[in-house]
Image (cartoon, helix red, strand yellow):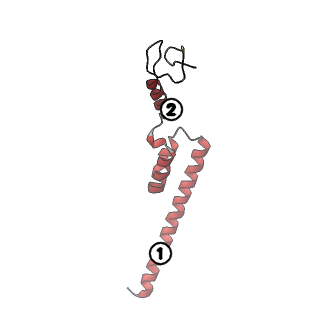
């Protein structure tokens, strides 16, 4: 036995419609499922990860405004992303300098 979410009367576990108030219990189940999955699509973790991998530090607002993450994790991920971005920029400049050096050595 379970309670009807509309009228709170006892009904059978397999019931599809409440015999007391006449409401369909499937509607209540759908409403409950929608309420549980009420999070925005851009707050889901896979979306945040894909955004960070594709656009790097431009995706930081997705982390900062995400209600699912604690303040400590937001700060840690911000530091990690900015540090990794700086590391990639320094590496890119080094590769470009090495490329120019090789071009000068070949005499082009």
The image shows residue 34, relative to residue 9, as above or below, that is below
> Which residue is nearer to you in this view: 3 or 50?
3
Q: Mark 1 = which residue?
A: 97
Query: Would you say the residues marked 2 and 1 are in contact, meaning their CB atoms lie under 8 Å apart?
Result: no
For marks 2 and 1, give the CA distance.
53 Å
Q: Secondary structure at mark 2?
A: helix
Q: Secondary structure at mark 1?
A: helix
Quadrant in which the C terminus appears: bottom left
> Which residue is nearer to you in this view: 17 or 28?
17
Q: Residue at x 47, y 17 (%)?
A: 18
The image shows residue 4, relative to residue 83, as above or below, that is above
Q: Position of residue 76 (x, y in %)?
A: 60, 49
Q: Mark 2 = which residue?
A: 36
Give the mark, 2 or 1, whose residue is nearer the N terminus.
2
The extreme left residue here reads 108
The extreme top residue here reads 20
Residue 8, image quadrant: top right
The extreme right residue here reads 72
Residue 87, image quadrant: bottom right
Q: How many marks?
A: 2
The image shows residue 65, relative to residue 97, as above or below, that is above
């Amino acid at each position: 036995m379970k309670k009807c979410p509309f009228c709170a009367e006892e009904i059978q576990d397999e019931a599809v419609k409440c015999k007391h108030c006449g409401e369909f219990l499937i509607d209540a189940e759908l409403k409950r499922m929608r309420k549980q999955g009420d999070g925005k699509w851009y707050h889901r973790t896979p979306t945040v990860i894909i955004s960070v991998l594709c656009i790097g530090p431009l995706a930081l607002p997705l982390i900062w405004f995400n209600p699912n993450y604690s303040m400590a994790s937001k700060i840690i991920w911000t530091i990690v992303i900015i540090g990794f971005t700086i590391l990639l920029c320094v590496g890119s400049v080094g590769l470009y300098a090495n490329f120019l050096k090789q071009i000068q050595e070949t005499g082009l």
